[in-house]
Structures are given as C-alpha cells and as structure tokens.
Amino acid sequence: MGMALTIVLIAVGAILAFAVDWDISGVNLDLVGLILMAVGFIGLASYVSIFKRRRVQPPSPAAPVVEETHRHEWRA
C-alpha cells in the first residue's frame, strides 16, 4: 500500500464519516468512514516505518588507523 493510496483512504473515510448525510439501509456510512480512516492511518504508519528503515544507511567504515613508528636514536 503506497502513500498515495493511504492518503486517499483517509480522505474518502473522512468524507464518508463527516460530510455525507446519506441514509442507506443496512450500511452505516459513519462507521465505514471511520474504518477507512483507521486503515489509512495504519497503512500510512507502516509505510513510513518501512520507508524509514530502507533509507537508513549503514555507518561508513572507520578511517584506517595509520601507525607511525618513530625511532629516536640518541647519540652520545
């Protein structure tokens, strides 16, 4: 379920729940709208969490440690 579909579900559910005043026998449009909005919000949350995990990049490898050996020779 993509982000556009979840937004459409939320919008259609809100329209059915709050803006439509139809009376259909056997169907409660307010409940259908609330269910569509809930499915849209759950789908949006899951889409965002999956998309967020895909975008996380592993940390770059640490720079190689350069060890320099210094020899101090003391001459007497």
Image (cartoon, rainbow, N blue to C red):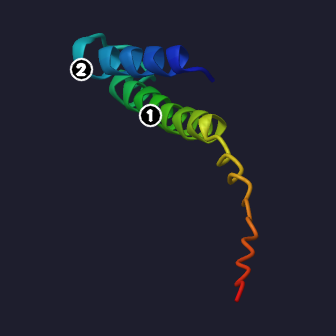
Q: Nearer the viewer, residue 22 or 75?
A: 75
Q: Position of residue 21 (x, y in %)?
A: 24, 12
Q: Amino acid at mark 1?
A: Phe
Q: Residue at x 65, y 48 (%)?
A: 59
Q: Between disc 2 and disc 1, whose residue precedes?
A: 2
Q: Are marks 2 and 1 in contact (CB under 8 Å)?
A: no
Q: Which of the image's four quarters has the N terminus?
A: top right
Q: Residue furthest bottom?
A: 76
Q: Position of residue 35 (x, y in %)?
A: 45, 32
Q: CA distance from mark 2 to mark 1?
A: 17 Å
In the rendered structure, the answer to whether residue 20 lies left or right of residue 44 reads left
Quickly name the residue at label 1: 41
Q: Residue at x 65, y 40 (%)?
A: 57
- Specify the quadrant of the image occupied by residue 28: top left
Q: Position of residue 2 (x, y in %)?
A: 59, 20
All told, the count of numbered labels is 2
Quickly name the residue at label 2: 18
Foreground mark, 2 or 1, reads 1
In the rendered structure, the answer to whether residue 58 lies left or right of residue 6 reads right
Q: Nearer the viewer, residue 11 or 59?
A: 59
In the rendered view, would you say 60 is above or below 39? below
Identify the mark at residue 33; answer none if there is no mark: none
Q: Which of the image's four quarters has the C terminus?
A: bottom right
Q: Residue at x 69, y 52 (%)?
A: 63
In the rendered view, would you say 42 is above or below 8? below
Q: Amino acid at mark 2?
A: Phe
Q: Residues within 10 Å of mark 1 (few under 14, many from 20)?
A: some
